[in-house]
Amino acid sequence: MKAEACTYVIFGATGNLSRIKLMPALYHLEAANRLPEGTRIMAVGRRPWDQSTWLAEVRAMLVSKIKADIDEAVFSRFSARLYYHQGDIGQTECYTQLAGQLANGEGFPKNIAFYLSISPSDFGAVMGFLSDNQLFDEDSGWRRVIIEKPFGYDLDSARALQKRISQYLSEEQIYRIDHYLGKGMVQNVLVFRFANVMLEPLWNRNYIDHIQITHSESIGIDSRGDYYNSAGALRDMLQSHLLQLLTLVAMEPPISMEAEALRDEKVKVLKSIRPIPKEAVHAHAFRGQYGKGHVNGEKVPGYLDETNIPANSSTETYASMKLYLDNWRWRGVPFYMRTGKRMAKAQSSISICFRHPPLQFFHGTDVRCMNPNWVLMGIQPEECIRIEMTVKEPGLEMQTRICSLDASFRNQDEKAIDAYEDLLLDVLKGDRSLFLRFDEVEYAWRIVDPILQTWAIERDFISTYPAGSWGPEDSRLFDKESQFWRSSLTPECK
């Protein structure tokens, strides 16, 4: 697909997401000469800024994020694309003036992408104003709308949001962005699975014991107390990012990499996940909340001592879950997922544990550390694929050790690409394969809704864990005594 010139209209352009992600990503696309000629970027904000003030603000954003000298030639080209529109997104005048500026301004492309970097509670109202001012009309060019998660607060609110959005837009115009899917290593999961024929015969219940997906963070909630206390770890990470990773690991090969074929297979995975009855929630899910402790040698407060957190809050900062897929490939294989704040290390990974050999030949010898084979995929910060195998140590004795076969994702001279760079470019191409279709969102909410409803009622007690640890004791989730959370991407002896 070829990227087409468009006008990127960013609502919430002065906010945190724009500051740390969107503007740096667009700048890097400019540096790589990937923005089509004629592309314009229109920022919408309430602050009474003129053009020179906005350009100075963008420069400050880039300096803060890039941590290096800005290429002046690149910034000169980039700044020529930048425009600022002052307006209150709650007032109709903002949109009538915007429509006039886009229609009569300085050569703005007729293709328009609206990026809603705003609170989800404002999505419906903003889309209503845009529709009233004919800004969704596609008479002279396409219209695409990018919306950030959360896509609803639960199943009912997600459906209500979709019903309102669909009054103004077709599904083909909606780009629900999950930045996790733009990460290079996440896309590499598909390549690793489907471009290496030696793995396909083993990728099923006959050879795989269980699969783990972990996203741990060493940071706390920062200044997001109000949002986080109403969301929690299950909504913030498991329902969205980690379930998406599960679909990529478990899906059947699509007939092509075309967007709908890929998304069809992901939805099939979500549909096959065994529902969790409310009476079985405690056997399938666990929650915890971080207390005070030490992270990277520094003393940090507990969750209840953070700003804007009620003293009696039972919001989870750690959530783990066990799921089963009732299909031919994965019947009986548990999928374990966990996420947490203030944990020992910041790391996202997929760990695939294979079954033990059917017969152990080495009883009565000095062989130790007969671990199962693992396939380890590091998503961030370390991007890697490793296969662990047992090998004999050199020498006269029959002793073994774990050997790790590493497949480097990126060569030393290759630059890391931020997920938003990929996704913003895909919008210009009209490639929706890495964006979420509504049925993906709906089935993901169906999976976690029974857990959310149970936890909402049970507010008297929540387990705690020290900040800087690997979370609370939740080993009861595991099906076997031999199963344990894999917290390292290097060989472990158990």
Image (spheres, rainbow, N blue to C red):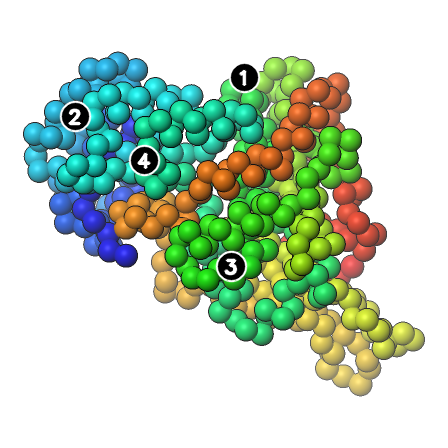
Q: Which residue is mark 4?
A: 145
Q: At which x and y percent is residue 348?
A: 56, 48
Q: Secondary structure at mark 4?
A: strand
Looking at the image, how many numbered discs can be counted on the residues?
4
As shown in the figure, which amino acid type bears the numbered disc 4? Val
> Can you tell which mark lies on residue 99?
2
For residue 91, above or below residue 57: above
Res. 237 visible in picture: no
Cα distance, mark 3 to mark 2? 42 Å
Observer-side mark, 1 or 4, equals: 4
Quadrant of the rendered image containing residue 402: bottom right
Specify whether residue 288 is in view: yes
Name the amino acid, label 2.
Answer: Ala
Which is more foreground, mark 3 or mark 4? 4
Disc 3/disc 4 C-alpha distance (Å): 27 Å
Badge number at residue 189:
3
Q: Does the residue at mark 3 contact the one at mark 2 (Cβ under 8 Å)?
A: no
Where residue 460 sits in the image (x, y, percent)? Answer: 75, 18
Q: Residue at 59%, 45% (x, y): give it.
A: 271
Q: Sequence-wise, which precedes: disc 1 or disc 4?
A: 4
- Dot 3 falls on a residue whose secondary structure is helix
Instruction: Return the disc, 4 or 2, that comes first in the chain's sequence.
Output: 2
The kind of residue tagged 3 is: Val
Rounded to the nearest angstrom, the CA distance separating label 4 from label 2 is 16 Å
Q: Which mark is residue 308?
A: 1
> Residue 174: horizontal and vertical position, in percent?
36, 37
Report if the CB atoms under discs 3 and 4 are less than 8 Å apart. no
